[in-house]
Each structure stands twice: as C-alpha cells, then as structure tokens.
Image (cartoon, coloured by chain):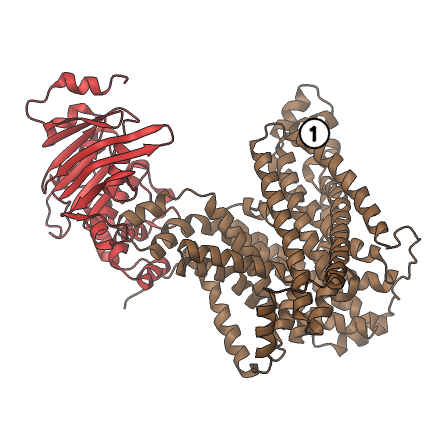
C-alpha cells in the first residue's frame, strides 16, 4: 500500500483559505438576481463623475471633519490610557516593583472584556446609556482601543526580558530609574509605530460608527447609498480616500523616520507633546462644528435584569445556532481575506497586475463593511454568504496591503535564482517570494481572524445570522437580559479566539510574541 | 555555447563590468578569479540571465538569452554563493525546485503539499553524498556543508547543460571542498564521507561537462582547463591553465 504523507507547507497554507470564496459564491448563486445590476453599474460609473454640487461637497466636508476630529480625539485618549493600562498589565513592571506578577495577570483578565467587544457594539450600548452625543462615538472607540494598545504594549514589554533590569538594579538604580532606562529605548519605536497605525484604525472605526447613525461621514455614506445617490456617495468616498491616502503616506514617512532615527526616546517625547496638542485641537475642532462637547453627559445606566429574566432569555435564544453561524461567518470571511491576496499576486504577478490589485485593495479598505454588504445586496438576497463576502472583502484590502509591504521589504534573491533556473513568474514567486513571507503572514492571519470574529457584529444584520445580528435585534427590542447574555457569550467567544490565535502564532513563528507584521498593521 | 559580447554593466559606484567578451565552449571547465568586488558575481548573474547588462549581449547557442525563454534558462544551472534555498520547505521540496522550469503550476503546488517524485530526489541526494532519508528533513536541521549539498542536488535535478558556480567552496572545510569540486568537475559522485563513488547510480544523474566557477583558491586552478581573471570589472586574464603565469594571478589580487 502506498502511503502518502501530506504536510502542507506555509506557502500552500497561505493559499488554501481562498477556497472559501468558492463556497461563498456557490452559496450565493441561488439568491443571485440581476435586478440591481443597473444600480451596480450606476455605482461604478458614478466613481468617475462624483457630484460637485456645493451643497453636497460642503455636507460631505462637514461629515469628514466630524469623523476626522472624532478619530483623532479617541486615538489620542485611547493611546494614553492604553499605555497606562499596558504598563499595569505587564508582569515585568510588577516584578520590578513588588516582586510579584499577579496584579499584571489581574489587569490582563480585566481588559480582555473591553477588548473582546467591537466598537460598534460599544457604540450601540453607549447610545442607550448616554443618548445621542458626540462623546458616544469617542468613547466607543476609546474603550476597546485602549485595551488593544494595552495588550500589545504588555506583550512587547514581557518579551523584553528581565536581564537588563536586573543588571541596572544591581548597579544601584532605583526601580523607576531602571525601568525607564531599560524599557524606553527598545519600546519607543514599537509603541510609536503601533500607535500610528491605530490612528488609521480609529478613522475607519469613526466612519463605521457614522454608518450606524453616530454622525460624521459614515452617516452621509449610509444615507446616500440608501437613496441610491451614487454620485453624492462618491463625493464622500473620494474625500475619505484622500484623507486615508494622506494618512497612509504620513504613517509610512513616520515609520521610515523611526527606522533611521537613533534617538527614539526624544522622538517619543515629541510624539507625546504632539498628540496632546492634537487632542486639544480636535476637541476645539468638534466644538467649532457646532457639536456640544461641553454640556454634562446624562448617564442612564442599563437596567439590570433579574435572574429569572436571564433564565428566560437564555431559553429564548438558539445558542448553538448563533455560535455556529458566528464561527462560520468568521471562517468564510477569514478564508477570503487571507487566501485571496497571495492567490491574486501569484496568478497575476506582472507589474500591471500588482498595480491593479493594489488599487483594488485600497478601494476595499475604503468602503466600510456594512456599505460593501449593502452594495452586494443590490444583486443578492441577504444571507450568511453575502455577509461573509462583505466582511472578507474589507479585510482582504488590509491583508493585501500588509502582504505587499512585507514582500517589498524582502530580498528577491531566491525569486531571481528560481527565475534563472527557468521557473516561470508564477512558480518563482510562489517558491521564491511567498515561501519566505508565509510563516509571518499566517501568524498575522491568525490575529486577523480573531479581529474578524469581533467584526461579525458589523455584518450580522446582512446575514440575519450570528451573535452580532442577534445582539442588535435584542438591543432594538430593549431586551436587556438577552443583551447581557449575548455580550457575555460574544466576549467569551472572542477571548477563546484570542487564545486560539495565540497558539496558531506560536505554531507558525515559534513565539507567542506578536509577529512584526502584526505590529505594522493591526485594526 | 555561451557567449558574452561587449558586456557592460553600470553600477551606482561606477562600472561593475567593462566590455567583457567571452566565449565558453561545450566541455570547457573554466575558473573565474579576481579579488572581491572585481565583478565575478555580476558576470555570472549576467551569464545566467538574472541580471541584464547595461549594454552588450549574451548568446546561448547563438541565440540571444531571452529573459522569458524558459528552456534556455533550464539549460544554465547556477550554484549561488548564498545557495538560495527555500527555508520553509523540506530537503526534497528544495531539490524538486530544480525541476520547476519544466513543470506546471499545478505540479509546483502539489510539491508544496507533499514532495513529489520522491525517488528522483533521493537519487539526487545520494549522488551528492547525502543519505536518502534526509529527504523529508527540514533545512534548519542541516549543517552548512549539508545545505551546500542540497543546493548541488537541486542542480542535478535541474539537469542543466552548463553550471555557473559562484564561490561554492568558500564556506566548506578542505575535504568537503575537494569533494564538491570533484563533483562539479564531473569527476564522480559523492559518498556520505565525501569520497568519490561510482556505485551504479542512475546514469541520468551527472553534472554537465561545462563549468564556469568563481573561486579564490588559486592553488586549485590547475584542475580547470582555462582560467579567466577579472580586475575592476575588466577581463584581464584569459588563457589555458597550462603554463599559467603565477605573477599574473598575483597581480589580480593586488589592490587596483
């Protein structure tokens, strides 16, 4: 008997998830209709002639300003809070001061909850508690982002090791002196690079919250799409694209500067001052846009359900189905997002192909997931597959950019060697370029899948499936017992996803530490 | 067989190669010498088509070496200085990488799932003195010398008509360097201990007769038929190894 040992290698594992697209498309076929084809063509053609009506432009400009100022303020606040919480959840810090690590573990566990709930869900919950206020969007972004910054910072701090600290303490340095000397120089570039990326994420987050009615450009996008005013929609989209491109270029310049600069602590000090100024400016900016930032916030706590209400709610919901659908949605979306960028680059490796793919990825990153879902609904019936495609498409844009950036920084000697031996472009790219990058790419993919699990809340309503969809339904019907239970289960599921992705990272990179790629691009 | 005509290569810090004219005939074994930075690696890269000259032409069997012409490239095998092995793949998959020029994308993908034509890989490994059971080993488990042999096995799998070798002996201990040189000079196959063997391995596995190899060990030059020397990107020595002028070789290594 012939025994074949199958042992898929990292480059193949990077490509295989693309099969999810076949499953999704097959599932979408029965619900496909050509009714919205004309609208889809109108949407595409409107991209080249967006509305230049002064009223439309000024409305989009005001929305963009609100989104930008909201993103900026929540980014500044979450970065500062995140750093404090990150220090509090690092075992290295506690061991240096009190010789024990349990407070760090306590803070880590505590922060897992705000991190596990997506900013949209925070937004909807805060809307119930605070009413319609500009602070809702700011807090909705700040809460999970602070916890995310804290986790990344504490992870990085704990991988530094204690040896430099021990050496400094033995030379007579006080704990605070030893810590600042040992951790600021290596941590400053990592922290600045990561916080820089969170600004891009905050901009996307603020746009998304707008789509769900929390103001800013997202609201303009949602209203123009719902009324099929595509030319007006593209006015807003091009404005957002311009800001995104400028921001991406700024971040790229910033990273290059950090790389070449030998004085990271000085850069950190400059960054902190700059962020403080930006925070104050964004507050004034929001106020100048006639948003009342100074009036006191009226707090209406969510009603606490009784035990019997909780029991009733737990019986009302089909938990298994909700959880399976959420996981299925994540799996399919992750497959599309992870597998398609390397597949596209392999099948179309020419310079023209790369340029077109980069453009497409930029477009996919630009369009918020719920809008992508609504566009798909022009020609498809709502289903889990449509939701997965919309979620996967947005994340595909992020993964594609990440892979391209990583490949651009890699030596092409292996690719050239294979080309010289007669291998074709596609095969040489597969073996000579993707192979070296695939373990890091897979490790980041594990993290990204974990992010997508949280994001299922955003597209749940399109699929009419999953915990996110049910949560929005329960919120709409003010069924607080269900809301509490759903948030609890959602948080547990995402925490489980986090543990699983940590293990996958360890498997592919041999380290629990977040891969360099993950630090470069996380949202 | 392989011809370089008026090849010129500009670099960021001046000319890397200047007006190189070179003809390599079938069966010739040529040593390429010169100090570091003299242009040896650039010349080999231009000869295998991985680098385009700024001016001049490279001809393979009388036809211009086309970057897109895969069969031409398959005929030219290169042993790279940094080996260019794919770290994420196992030994057999790396050996199979030598055959990629003749195979389809589907074959290449299947090889990433599990090494295919494993017996061919084992034969190539045995021919370079590696045990066949190393086929499924990871590259990280191998020593520097073993990695060098994997690169040689990949070359055997490619079955080229000419070998261009870029300082293949530089990181090897003397016995292994001798064994690798013997293999490249087509003097025999290797055993695990690095000694020559002729124990009935398939006749299809052998090194091509034509070799252009860069090296620094001038004491090995008499093992070749011809020697060419580069100095500051110029071809300044091109003669038979018989009656070689030792002073000319020493001059090559003096600072320009």
SS assignment at label 1:
helix
Q: Please identify the residue farthest to the left as the structure is shown.
A: B242
Q: Residue at x 58, y 52 (%)?
A: A502
Between B101 and A294, the one lying in front of the other is A294
Quarter holding residue A129: bottom right
Quadrant housing the N terminus of chain A: bottom left
Between B55 and A295, the one lying in front of the other is B55
In the image, is A217 to the left or to the right of A503? right
Bin the neighbour count of mark 1 within 10 Å (Cα to Cα): few under 14, some 14-19, many 20 and up. Answer: some
Quarter holding residue A266: top right
Q: Which residue is drawn at 68% across and 36% down?
A: A92
Q: What is the drawing colour of chain A?
A: brown
x and y percent of residue A498 in the render?
A: 63, 55
In the image, is A132 to the left or to the right of A399? right
User: Label 1: chain?
Assistant: A
Q: The red chain is which one?
A: B
Does B21 sit above or below residue A114?
A: above
x and y percent of residue B152 in the render?
A: 24, 43
x and y percent of residue B30 in the render?
A: 14, 34
Q: Mark 1 points at which residue?
A: A179
Q: Residue at x 35, y 32 (%)?
A: B11
Q: Which residue is drawn at 67% across and 65% down?
A: A51
x and y percent of residue A271 in the render?
A: 70, 36
């Amino acid at each position: 008997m012939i025994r074949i040992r199958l042992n898929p290698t990292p480059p193949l594992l990077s490509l295989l998830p693309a099969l999810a697209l076949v499953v999704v498309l097959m599932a979408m076929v029965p619900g496909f209709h050509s009714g919205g084809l004309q609208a889809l063509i109108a949407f595409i053609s409107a991209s080249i002639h967006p509305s230049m009506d002064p009223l439309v432009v000024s409305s989009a400009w005001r929305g963009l300003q609100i989104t930008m100022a909201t993103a900026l303020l929540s980014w500044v606040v979450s970065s500062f809070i995140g750093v404090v919480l990150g220090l509090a959840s690092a075992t290295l810090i506690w061991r240096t001061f009190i010789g024990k690590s349990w407070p760090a573990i306590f803070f880590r566990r505590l922060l897992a909850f705000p991190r596990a709930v997506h900013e949209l869900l925070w937004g909807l919950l805060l809307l119930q508690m605070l009413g319609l206020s500009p602070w809702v969007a700011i807090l909705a972004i700040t809460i999970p982002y602070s916890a995310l910054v804290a986790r990344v910072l504490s992870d990085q701090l704990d991988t530094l090791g204690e040896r430099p600290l021990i050496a400094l303490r033995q030379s007579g340095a006080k704990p605070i002196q030893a810590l600042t000397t040992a951790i600021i120089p290596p941590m400053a570039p990592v922290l600045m690079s990561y916080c820089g990326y969170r600004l891009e994420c905050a901009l996307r987050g603020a746009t998304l919250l707008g789509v769900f009615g929390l103001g800013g450009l997202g609201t303009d996008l949602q209203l123009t799409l719902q009324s099929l005013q595509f030319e007006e929609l593209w006015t807003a989209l091009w404005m957002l694209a311009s800001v995104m491109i400028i921001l991406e270029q700024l971040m790229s310049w910033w990273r290059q500067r950090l790389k070449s600069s030998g004085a990271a602590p000085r850069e950190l000090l400059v960054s902190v001052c700059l962020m403080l100024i930006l925070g104050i400016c964004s507050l004034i900016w929001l106020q100048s846009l006639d948003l009342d930032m100074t009036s006191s916030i009226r707090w209406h706590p969510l009603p606490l359900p009784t035990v019997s209400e909780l029991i009733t709610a737990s019986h009302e919901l089909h938990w298994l189905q909700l959880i399976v659908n959420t996981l299925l949605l994540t799996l399919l979306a992750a497959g599309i997002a992870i597998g398609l960028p390397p597949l596209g680059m392999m099948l179309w490796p020419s310079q023209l192909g790369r340029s077109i793919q980069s453009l497409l990825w930029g477009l996919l990153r630009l369009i918020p997931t719920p809008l992508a879902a609504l566009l798909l609904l022009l020609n498809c019936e709502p289903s889990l597959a449509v939701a997965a495609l919309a979620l996967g498409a947005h994340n595909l844009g992020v993964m594609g950019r990440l892979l391209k950036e990583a490949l651009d920084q890699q030596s092409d000697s292996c690719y050239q060697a294979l080309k010289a031996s007669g291998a074709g472009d596609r095969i040489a790219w597969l073996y000579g370029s993707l192979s070296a990058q695939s373990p890091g790419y897979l490790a980041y993919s594990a993290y990204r899948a974990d992010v997508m699990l949280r994001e299922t809340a955003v597209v749940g309503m399109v699929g009419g499936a999953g915990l996110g969809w049910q949560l929005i339904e329960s919120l709409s019907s003010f069924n607080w017992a269900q809301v509490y239970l759903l948030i609890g289960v959602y948080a547990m599921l995402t925490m489980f996803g986090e543990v699983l992705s940590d293990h996958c990272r360890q498997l592919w990179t041999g380290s629990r530490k977040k891969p360099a790629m993950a630090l470069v691009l996380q949202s | 067989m392989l011809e370089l005509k008026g090849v010129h290569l500009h670099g960021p810090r001046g000319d890397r190669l200047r007006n190189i004219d070179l003809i390599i005939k079938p069966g010739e074994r040529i040593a390429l010498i010169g100090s570091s930075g003299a242009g040896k690696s650039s010349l080999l890269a231009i000869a295998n088509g991985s680098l385009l000259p700024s001016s001049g032409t490279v001809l393979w069997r009388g036809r211009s070496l086309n970057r897109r012409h895969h069969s031409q490239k398959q005929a030219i095998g290169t042993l790279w200085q940094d080996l260019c092995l794919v770290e994420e793949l196992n030994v057999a998959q790396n050996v199979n990488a030598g055959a990629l020029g003749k195979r389809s994308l589907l074959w290449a993908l299947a090889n990433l799932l599990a090494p295919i034509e494993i017996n061919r890989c084992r034969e190539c490994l045995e021919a370079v003195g590696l045990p066949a059971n190393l086929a499924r080993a990871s590259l990280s488990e191998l020593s520097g010398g073993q990695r060098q042999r994997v690169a040689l096995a990949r070359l055997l799998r490619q079955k080229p008509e000419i070998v261009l070798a870029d300082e293949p002996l530089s990181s090897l201990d003397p016995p292994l360097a001798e064994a690798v040189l013997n293999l490249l000079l087509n003097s025999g196959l290797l055993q695990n201990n690095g000694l020559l063997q002729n124990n009935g391995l398939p006749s299809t596995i052998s090194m091509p007769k034509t070799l252009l190899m860069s090296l620094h060990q001038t004491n090995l030059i008499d093992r070749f038929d011809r020697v060419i020397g580069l100095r500051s990107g110029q071809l300044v020595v091109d003669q038979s190894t018989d009656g070689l002028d030792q002073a000319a070789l020493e001059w090559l290594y003096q600072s320009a």
